[in-house]
Amino acid sequence: YRDNEVQVGDAIFDLIENLDISNVPTNKVSLAGLDQKDLNEMISDALCLYPRISKTLSDIVFQKTKGNPFFVLEFMKSLQSRGLLQYDSSQKRWVWNEDAIRAEEITDNVLYLLSKKMNQLSDEMQILLKVMACFGTSTNES
């Protein structure tokens, strides 16, 4: 669970308490988001740009994602798929529209981006995913 997304009284705390009472070993792993410097390095590496060039983009991405690595990835994919981030073959580098990206009404919730992607899947695929989710985190192809 993400401690910034749950409140005291949520079911996850009851589960953890029951596991403790039953002497089931658990581990708590705390993961922080990327800071602005690390995010800029990640984006500059991904786009093969010098960090000084990617800084304006990474600052906007940080502002929108608060450094959540998963959200950064989904946000960057969404920028590229909607043409706000694109490769310019004449300049031989990635370019972006800062004003358009800044103006993006993006929710702080990663689930928004995922649900938007899932809604683009066919009805049959959505049903299949719902059924598969009942079986856990992995299935065998057959």
Image (cartoon, rainbow, N blue to C red):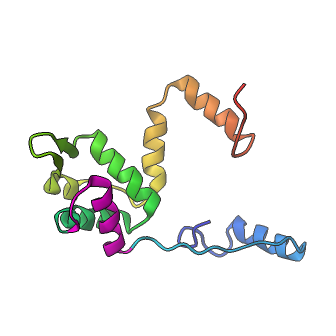
Using residue 64 as the reference point, say whether residue 83 is left or right of it. Answer: left
Determine which quarter of the picture holds residue 15.
Answer: bottom right
Q: Is residue 74 above or below residue 7?
A: above
**Is residue 47 covered in magenta?**
yes
Q: Count the marks.
A: 0
Can residue 107 be spotted in the picture? yes
Residue extending furthest right? 22
Determine which quarter of the picture holds residue 66.
Answer: bottom left
Q: Is the N terminus in the top left, top right, bottom left or bottom right quadrant?
A: bottom right
Can residue 105 be spotted in the picture? no
**Is residue 82 covered in magenta?**
no
Task: State the residue at coordinates (75%, 40%).
Answer: 135
x and y percentages locating residue 138 in the rendered image: 70, 42
Q: Is residue 117 above or below residue 7?
A: above
Using residue 49 as the reference point, say whether residue 69 is left or right of it. Answer: right
Task: State the residue at coordinates (60%, 73%).
Answer: 7
x and y percentages locating residue 107 in the rendered image: 37, 57
Using residue 59 as the reference point, say whether residue 68 is left or right of it. Answer: right
Residue extending furthest left? 90
Prevailing secondary structure of the magenta residues: helix
x and y percentages locating residue 110 in the rendered image: 46, 55
Numbered range of the magenta stretch: 35-51
Most foreground residue, 16 or 89: 89
Most foreground residue, 46 or 27: 46
Task: State the residue at coordinates (72%, 24%).
Answer: 142
Task: State the residue at coordinates (69%, 33%).
Answer: 131
x and y percentages locating residue 28 in the rendered image: 68, 74
Determine which quarter of the picture holds residue 81.
Answer: top left
